[in-house]
Amino acid sequence: MNEAISHFLSVQDEELGSIAGEELGLSEVLYDRSQCKPFLRWAGGKTRLLSAILPHVPKNFRNFHEPFLGSGAIFFAVRSRAQQCYLSDLNSELINLWRAVQARPRALFNRLQPYLDRQGEDEYYVIRAEAPTQALERAARFFYLNQTSWNGLWRENRWGVFNVPWGARAFRGIEFASLKAVADTLKDTEIVEQDFRQSISRAQPGDFVYLDPPYLPISDTSKFAGYNGKRFRINDLEELAFLCEGLTKRGVHWIVSNRDNEHIRKIFSHAKVYSFTTRRSVSAQAKRHIQPKDSPEVIVVGGPNR
């Protein structure tokens, strides 16, 4: 196995998080390891939490919806069980990359090759400052930054400008076979730049919706996450909880991931809440060493007969 494919298959190891699985009584990941894996590094990605999440996925469902797409870990894990999939996110650059992989894997692969010669901190900041307008070039730039930024974090300022520092990583690219495998997995899949409210409204009885919104702040002085130049606020999370209650009434299965705290349990009192502990360490300050810390988290499960 060459270096690029090895990297592709082990992206999940970059996501900092481990599960105290004993609290859930789970012994295995209900995941076909031969399936396609996430091709992106993503802060908060759920690859390492599959053993906690997948046992709560309904055994049978029609279509799958993932409004906060990110690296799509849950999508890849359940794709073979869904008739059709609807993926969405408000991050326009992220969605542009997913669409490029889906529709033009060979062209994207070719466009990534020059980036293999653009290594190091200085080149990173040159590329970060660039603002290409052509869709394929935007996709290539996004993938380069995702692979070389600090912890795979995508964060934008209020003007929508990406501002994460260099992560002291070499850009290793990706094999065409890996991109083609993702493109094949994305058949019968709709990918749109869309707000979660619109995405949820499309779910029909028997469908399954997985939602991984920005986590509640750890403290009252912390800020809610903003990954696309806009803040996801507490009232957005409360509205999401209300909409999830509506999904249950419409016969739609759903799961929400978030940090465990009293407010989460209050707004999701209409559903079942399962708790567990992860180890997380994500910072956007590349020269600062952050020790991993325990992070209490929840999986909220709702839907018909749940």
Image: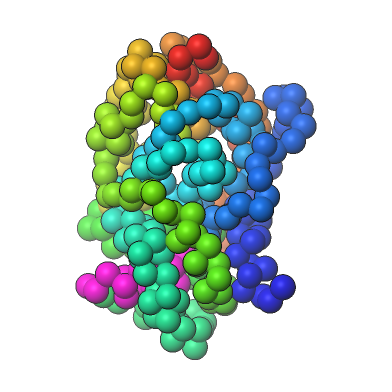
At a point 61% along the width and 24% down the height, the residue shown is: 275
Residue 216 shows in this picture: no
Q: Quadrant of residue 141?
A: bottom left
Residue 163 position within the rendered picture, expressed as x and y whole percent measured from the top left: 37, 63
Q: Quadrant of residue 14?
A: bottom right
Q: What colouring method underlies this structural image?
A: rainbow
Residue 292 position within the rendered picture, expressed as x and y whole percent measured from the top left: 65, 47
At a point 52% along the width and 74% down the height, the residue shown is: 176
Query: Relative to residue 198, is residue 294 drawn left or right?
Result: right
Queried whether the magenta region covers residue 138, the answer comes back as yes
Query: Relative to residue 21, is residue 169 drawn left or right?
Result: left
At a point 37% along the width and 69% down the height, the residue shown is: 104
Queried whether the magenta region covers residue 216, the answer comes back as no
Residue 40 position within the rendered picture, expressed as x and y whole percent measured from the top left: 50, 59
Tell which of 204 and 241 is nearer to you: 204
Residue 161 position within the rendered picture, expressed as x and y whole percent measured from the top left: 29, 62
Which region shows up in magenta? 133-146
